[in-house]
Structure formats: C-alpha cells, structure tokens
Image (tube, rainbow, N blue to C red):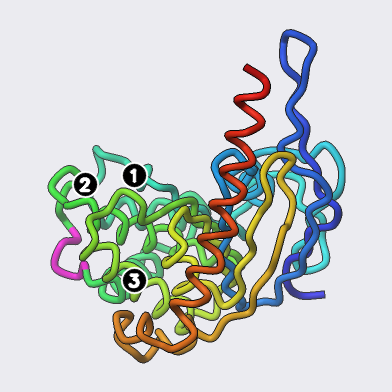
Amino acid sequence: MNGLQLQDVSMRFDLPNGSHVQALKNVSFDLKAGELLSVLGPSGCGKTTLLNIVAGFLAPTSGKIVLNGHTISGPDAERGMVFQKGALFEWMSVRENVAFGPRMKGAPKAETAETVDHLLDVVGLGDFKEKAIYELSGGMQQRVALARCLANDPDVILMDEPLGALDALTREKMQALVLKLWKETGKTIILITHSVEEALLLGERLIVMAPRPGRIHKEYRLPFAEIGVDADLREVKRHPDFAPKRDEILNMIWDMEEEIMGRTEEAA
C-alpha cells in the first residue's frame, strides 16, 4: 500500500531519576501519497518527537510506522528532513550542498549536475550556485535546504518549523514556494508549525495535537492549500472560511495552554 501509516504510535522517555515522560500516546493516521499535512499544538505536545519518529531518528516505544508497505526502522533517503535552520554545510557552496546527497549515493556526475541546476532554478537560486552558504540570507538558506532535500528524491518531506526564523515577507514567499513544490513534485509533506495561519495555508489536512501525552485532538480537511497554489496567499486569507477557522483553532490551543498552566501551578 502506497502512502504513510502511523499505527498506535506511543513514545515514553525514561528519566535518570526513575520517572518518565509520556511524549506521545496512541497516535494513528494515514497519509496518501502526495498529501500535505500540517501539525499544530501547544508547546510540549510531541510534535517534533512525532516528526523524528517518522524520520527514523527515534524508535517509538510502541506502535509502528509503515511507508509504502514496509515498516520504518531508521533514517533513509526515502524520507527527507528540512529543519528550522537549514543545517547546511557552511564550508561548501550552494551547488555542493544540493549535490551532497546524490554524490553520497554514487549518482553519475552529469546527472547530478543537471538535477542540481534544475532544482536551484526551481527555488530561485540559479544565479547563486557558487556562493558560500554564509553569503546567503536566512530565506535563501532555507531555499537551499529545500533543494538539497528534493535532490534526494524522497517520497516524504518532513519539515520541522522550517520558516519559523524568517521575517514576515520572506516567510510568505517561502510558504508560496512550499505550495508550488508540493503541487509540482507530488511529494507527501508533513509540516510542523506553531503558526495557526501557516498551518491553515499549507495544510491540505491539519492535525491539532493535545498536550502531553501528545495525541490527536482534532483533524481538519481544508481547501486553502489547493487554492493557494494559484492564488496570492493574502487573498487566500480573505476567504470567508479562513478567519473563523483560524479563530476556532486559536481558541482550542489557547484553552490547552491554559490547562497546561493550571497543571503547572498545581504541581508548584
């Protein structure tokens, strides 16, 4: 079966003092190939833990993750990660960073060069191929990170707050780029974000997670990502359903944060 399935995934961290933290509990969902999922939730609800499990960086305490019919047991090129900060090789040029994955897989040089040139054109960095990473702005570095991820041709792209450190204008441009790449490549994407607006704009599906132990509180199927592929994102925000949905989810997360604060005060 193509696509990604999470089956009753739980994650418990045992602490040195004998206590433990239940980060995730019985998280299950199916993603069809090519779907774009955004994940929201209050701080500490296990969003990044969930992404790291799908990436293969962590093994769940129980449950399993199945991709295209096989169980995930560790990191693999079929899953690509884009971090909040690009995690790029500062000593390499833009071209060398994007070419790194194919080169490690032993891809032919000519084929790699063609792929790199194409992807850098797609992300708008065709004129910056020989620049050093430190010469680029934060937004340009995230474009390199996206191109580097795509160069490995993963089935699933995992994005952990990839736009969180960018200024508002650059963030909006990058959101439009993510939608463009999603539609053009047909990749399955899971995006973690703290921004409700961003989750609405970029999530064909949106999951709101409940506070620890992290679990799915509510799921939405939304039209805004599909609309945003061919429309100005500022216009998408004027859609009559956008503001009510944003307010509904903001209030939901606010109530969860209040609950967390109440627990903290009781514990103190």
The residue shown at (34%, 76%) is 176
How many dots with numbers?
A: 3
- Which numbered marker is on residue 88? 1
Residue extent of the magenta highlight: 125-129
Q: Secondary structure at mark 1?
A: loop
- Which numbered marker is on residue 70? none
Task: Give the answer, above or below, for where 125 lies relative to 163.
Answer: below
Q: Is residue 77 left or right of residue 235?
A: right
Q: Is residue 66 left or right of residue 265?
A: right
Structural distance between the alpha carbons of marks 1 and 2: 7 Å
Callout 1 touching callout 2 (CB < 8 Å): yes
- Residue type (three-letter) at the residue carrying disc 2: Ile
Residue 206 image point, x, y percent = 60, 69
Q: Which residue is mark 2?
A: 133
Residue 76 image point, x, y percent = 63, 51
Counting residues from the N terminus, which is met first, the one under dot 1 or under dot 2? 1
Counting residues from the N terminus, which is met first, the one under dot 2 or under dot 3? 3
Q: Which residue is mark 3?
A: 119
Badge 3 local density, few (<14 within 10 Å), some, or many (20+)?
Answer: many
- Residue type (three-letter) at the residue carrying disc 3: Leu
Task: Give the answer, above or below, for where 168 lies relative to 16.
Answer: below
